[in-house]
Image (cartoon, rainbow, N blue to C red):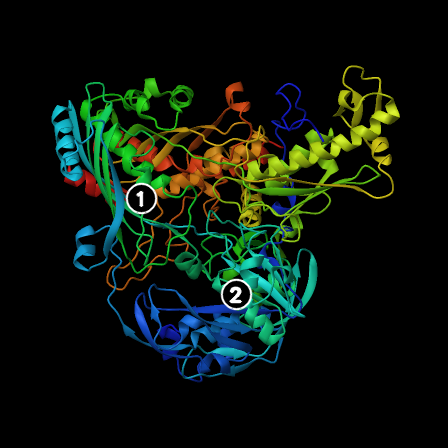
Amino acid sequence: MPEEYSWPSREASAVIGKVHDRLDGVVKSTGAAKYTYDVNLKNQLIAVAYGSPYAHCKIKSLDVSGAEKTPGVVHVEVLPQGKKDTEIEWEGELLAVVAAESEAAAREGVSKIKITVEELDVFADESNLTAAEVAGRTGKGGGKAETVNEPGDDDDEDEFVEKELQRLFDESKYVLEGEYGIDAITHCCLEPHGATVQWKDGKLEAYLSTQNVSGTDEGFARDLELTADDVHVQCEYIGGGFGSKFAPDYWGIAAARISKATGRPVKLMLQRDQELKLGGSRPSGYIKVRLGADENGVVQVWDSLQWGSSGFRGGGVSHSVIPYVLVPPNYRRVSTTIKSNTANARAWRAPNHPQACAMSQTALDDLAAKMGADSYDVFLANLVNATNGKAEVYRAEMEVGAKLIDWKAKWHPHGKGPSRGAIVDGLGMGLHTWGGTANTSSCLLKIYPDGGVESFCGTQDLGTGTRTVCAQVLAETLGLEVGQVKVNIGSSRYPNSGASGGSTTVGAVCESHRRAGQDAVAKVFDLAARELGVDASVLEAVGGQIRDSANHQKRISWRKACSLIGLKPLEVTSNYRRGDESPLTDSGVGGVQMAHVEVDKETGVIKIKKFVAVQDQGLVINPKTCKSQIYGAVIMGIAAALYEQRVTDPQSGKFVNAELSDYKLARLGDVGEIVVELYEPDSERIRGVIGNGEPPAISPKAAIANAVANALGVRVPTIPMTPKRVLDALAKA
Amino acid sequence: MTDSKQKSAPKSGFSRRAFLRGSGAVAAATALQTQAAVAVDDQGPNVVRGETSLTLNVNGQDVNVSCEPRTTLLDVLRYHLDLTGAKPVSLDGSSGASTVLIDGKPVMASTTLAMTAVGKEIKTVESLGGEQPDEVVKAFVEHDAQQCGFCTPGFVVAVRAFLDKNPDATEAEVRAGLNGNICRCGTYANIVEAALAVVKGG
């Protein structure tokens, strides 16, 4: 065993920190990679589900006889929620599944299902607090108040806070009031949720599109009255998850039941509209803010009322991250939840943070506008309010970002820039924070006597480059080339590794693979030391050799060293448990983003000219895939800032744009120039690895909204900033 | 599936000939051997039942497929030929994920009936792989123009088709000319780089 786990220095690193092509690049680019949707099992049935056409109703009858009679249909299952008298609370909730010889036959069968219902009252106008109150759909969402001065023993706390806040507002040099909002969006995974399953001899083989390879076998087992050892979950490739694919889901369980009933494999993937309606959404959030600042623009007091919805159970954006990152010494935040007839939200890349950032750093930018100040200076001044201890990191990242976007040269006061015809331009920024701690992970490492190396870990690669990171860490640790290491992931039969959520995966696999590598190479060193006649402690694994670090002539090849293992491979399993102190990983990052936009005041169309993202994430294993993650997060943010919106008809509760032609996402021509800068000075590198999946997805909305406000001199209060909203804001001004 | 146009059609009005003409596949009709019969249903869509035998030229090889006339090219590729590179993402073709080349032109396999592709040269993303992958594939790998990868095959084919037509494309042309495909992970910046690298010869 090594004395302690550690990373090599920047100078001594041969593989980590170096650009490497992702290992699955070719198979993904040529269609060879098999996703859940692509797994075709012999004699499989294709299942398509029928969803409720009503957003709120009680089922009176569900007639599936037409489906059963449809040629090609083999099996129809009415789901528990499709039974008579069940209350349906959102449109699209699946009620029955039709399994057929082909997808076309299954769809035809679904088209023959007839439903009668008693329609119930619908509420889906999440942005409208008054309407929600009238409809009796609101609930308390909690809140918190903090003041520097404390109430006396005899004071009523609420009254004290009210008076104290008023006093602070009266004392403020600047007081700003604003309303902001951000509509619900969906995960919209391009590979919909679903599974291809085979029930055979009391065991279940499940190909599941999942972010949780190690944790979904229990879910299948529990609902199917099996034990987890009877379930094998596999996911080599997943077509997007973004926080929405952690469970088998009831449709995955239904597929398994149908496989059991028919004795045939079953593929059940959600249809596109179902994916948008059920596959996951991000809660909406709306806020009324009043803030007071001193003469330098440093916010001293914040008072806000927010509302929003996560669907029928209420919810909305957690008040705990309001105001976002820059929290003044005195504040009160109150939250109201709204029960809406929309499907329950799922975790969406950095839950709560993007909305919180967009609902509070917009107010900060409006303060700058009110002061006639440079937004950069106001953000800088407010770093004293950073509650995460990252003020210095933000300061440094702001400097880097400002240079890259040429802030000083391009800045103009809000609404005071030059215009070319109807075109005006503007700058805006936002900053964010995230944890990104390492998840629990185990790695089984096999070193064969012929020098072959193979690892096994029940993690998954969401497109983040997990596979490549595993191979780089092992190659570095064993002194090999990346291509000499075979990485096996994506099976629940492999050692347990945590779900990929919360930016916890890169840390997790770095922990388990570095540990397994160091543990295994220590055993190889013991064998090589005897052969070389040196102490094992002086040995290092570099360039395919095991050598004396002080005398490089004393060496044997990796292959020769491995031949000393014996006849059977050397097997090492090493673990990391989430939360354990470790020199390999850390948590807590910052990140600063800046946008330069152009707005056409006649059409309301916003274009991204340039976007800069500066991101810290501790030690970077692969700068190429790390940057790709950030590019992706920014592009997702551009989509959410300008285009993406779940449009729900307030009368019927129907999700009216549940197809990709109507659910607008950014396309290639929409994203402008994006510059990504990895902030990795020694002070960051020494912290070890930290996940970066979520943090760069947080700020784009605030940064772009602020750039638009800077361009127009008018705030477009609700995101996405559609052309209509831009024109409405201009008309109102 | 039950739009009013089909519902109001006369019961006997849905003939195989009309169906083929409507699909623009008259030329293909002679190549078809079909046992398809018209089934008329008062309640829903008119469906031509029965399997049709088609010969399709896919990636340079003639393959025989037996499928219902309503079968899309995408379903034939994925379920009959196990060529799963082209992906089912949107029913209306708006994602571009099912892009294949038919006679060199990019087409959505999801909105193309298989029988309309008879007699044409169909190339899927799989034809760009092999021992010596296409330059576009190499550039996608080199510039990391993929994350989850689900949209990638469609994008690779779209970029190949675009560059075949515009071998000297500028950055502005690349940004203007590749908007038929959607990537949810946000790989566009890398795709622009990859496409321009191919223009520049690697």
Q: Give x and y (percent) for residue B92.
A: 45, 59
Circle 2: is it few (<14), some (14-19), or many (20+) Cα within 10 Å? some
Vertical side of A258 occupied by A66: above or below: below
- Which secondary structure lies at badge 1? loop
User: Tag on residue A302?
Assistant: none
Residues A666 and A383: in front is A383
Q: Residue at x 56, y 37 (%)?
A: A506
Contact flag, marks 2 and 1 (Cβ < 8 Å): no
Going from N to C along the chain, the mark reached first, 2 or 1, is: 2
User: Tag on residue A223?
Assistant: 2
Q: Give x and y (percent) for residue A692.
A: 49, 35
Q: Residue at x 59, y 36 (%)?
A: B198
Vertical side of A656 occupied by B175: above or below: above
Say how many tags the image has: 2
Residues A428 and A534: in front is A534
Asked whether, in this view, residue B192 is left or right of residue A599, the answer is right
List the residue tagged with mark 1. Answer: A720
Q: Quadrant of the N terminus of chain A?
A: top right
Vertical side of A96 occupied by B120: above or below: above
- Which secondary structure lies at badge 2? helix
Q: Quadrant of residue A375?
A: top left
The amino acid at mark 2 is Asp
Q: Residue at x 35, y 57 (%)?
A: A657
Q: Give x and y (percent) for residue A562.
A: 83, 34
Residues B187 and A216: in front is A216
Q: Quadrant of residue A640?
A: top left
Q: CA distance from mark 2 to mark 1?
A: 39 Å
Q: Quadrant of the C terminus of chain A?
A: top left
Inspect this view and state whether residue A95 appears: yes
Inspect this view and state whether residue B117 appears: no
Mark 2 vs mark 1, foreground winner is 2
Q: Which residue is the extreme one toward the top? A: A550
